[in-house]
Amino acid sequence: MKTAKELMQAYHANIQNPEAVSALFTSDGAIELPYLASIDGPWRTQGPENIKNMIAAILKMAPEFRFINIQFYIETLDQVFAEYEVDCLWNGKPYKQLYMGRLVSENGKIKLIREGMNMASVLEQ
């Protein structure tokens, strides 16, 4: 069974493959980006199919979207906290972002990824 850190590593490594990413989640697993609520954006995506569609939509706007400079700070078997960056083009504009992410696992799958980010970068898109 995969640990939380192994699941986050798989999430990062497979972000270019929406099907592979969605398969990492429990049936009720979710990705939350709470700060998107401040700009009336969808801040929670739940379920593997919806997660697959969300990742696919991101890749349409940012085909080179990848996580880089990943640093793990807190790790237990079922939770991990890390910071990671993205540096790509989003709809043809430079997109540089620092994410903070907490992953909670359940039975070797992702139950929750909750990410924080710099909203100024999002508003520039």
Image (tube, rainbow, N blue to C red):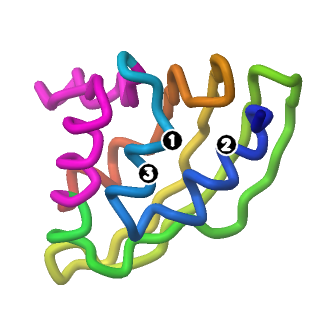
> Is residue 25 placed above or below 96 in the rendered structure?
above
- Tell me the number on the disc at residue 102: none
> Is residue 71 placed above or below 31 in the rendered structure?
below
- Residue carrying label 1: 24
Q: Residue furthest front?
A: 1
- Crowding near pointer 2: few (<14 within 10 Å), some, many (20+)? many
Foreground of the two, 48 or 102 = 48
- Judge left or right: residue 29 versus residue 60: right
Question: Of the residues shown, which amino acid type is indicated by label 2?
Answer: Leu
Among the 4 quarters of the image, the one containing residue 1 = top right
- Is the residue under label 2 in contact with that under label 1 (CB below 8 Å)? yes
Image position, residue 40 (x, y; %): 11, 25
- Judge left or right: residue 21 versus residue 62: right
Magenta residues? 29-57
- Is the residue under label 2 in contact with that under label 3 (CB below 8 Å)? no
User: Could you tell me which residue is drawn at 35 percent across and 27 percent down?
Assistant: 35
Quarter of the image with the C terminus in it: bottom left
**Separation (CA) of disc 3 from disc 2:** 10 Å
**Separation (CA) of disc 1 from disc 2:** 7 Å
Count of picture labels: 3
Closer to the N terminus: mark 3 or mark 2? Answer: 2
Foreground of the two, 5 or 68 = 5
Is-magenta flag for residue 92? no
- Is the residue under label 1 in contact with that under label 3 (CB below 8 Å)? yes
> Is residue 26 placed above or below 99 in the rendered structure?
above
**Separation (CA) of disc 3 from disc 1:** 5 Å
- Residue carrying label 3: 21
- Residue carrying label 2: 7
Image position, residue 5 (x, y; %): 78, 41
- Crowding near pointer 1: few (<14 within 10 Å), some, many (20+)? many
User: Could you tell me which residue is drawn at 71 percent across and 67 percent down?
Assistant: 69
